[in-house]
Amino acid sequence: MPIATPEVYNEMLDRAKAGKFAYPAINVTSTQTLHAALRGFAEAESDGIIQISTGGAEFLGGQYNKDMVTGAAALAEFAHIVAAKYDITVALHTDHCPKDKLDTYVRPLIEI
């Protein structure tokens, strides 16, 4: 299934609230950890949340560039392609960051 749209994510959250459960949220730092999280969700037959932190995004941006925005965007694009092969719905959070990184991480991601 595809990555959840904002509308689908709202439905997921409403379903969790009504059913009194929580979705697992997994921090990923590479394509390998993304695949592992997706496989875990699929094996558990559970929808879930994939999170990318500023550190994970920086790592994904490259050893020398350390570009958090590029790293998060690249993993998000990759996630859209590979998540479609699984029979689960996954929400993607690329906006986890401390306040001091808002201008260099979250705001540029919003512009994409």
Image: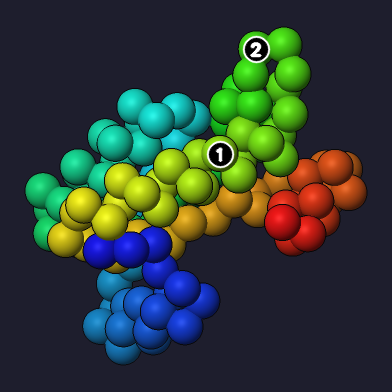
What is the three-letter code of the residue carrying label 2? Gln
Residue 19 coordinates in the image, percent (x, y): 25, 83
Q: Nearer the viewer, residue 56 or 19?
A: 56
When the figure is inspected, residue 20 is found, relative to residue 94, above or below; the finding is below
The residue where tag 1 is placed is 74
What is the three-letter code of the residue carrying label 1? Ala
When the figure is inspected, residue 64 is found, relative to residue 56, above or below; the finding is above
SS label for mark 2: loop
Q: Which residue is rendered at x = 49% and y = 30% of the image? A: 29
Residue 64 coordinates in the image, percent (x, y): 72, 11
Q: Which residue is rendered at x = 36% and y = 49% of the image? A: 81
Residue 102 coordinates in the image, percent (x, y): 83, 50
Q: Quadrant of the C terminus?
A: bottom right
Whether tag 2 and tag 1 are in contact, CB under 8 A, the answer is: no
The residue where tag 2 is placed is 63
Name the residue at the top extreme. Answer: 64
Q: Let me know if residue 85 appears in the view.
A: yes
Q: Which residue is rendered at x = 39% and y = 30% of the image? A: 31
Q: Which residue is rendered at x = 67% and y = 36% of the image? A: 70
- Which one is earlier in the sequence, the residue at label 2 or at label 1? 2
Residue 85 coordinates in the image, percent (x, y): 21, 52
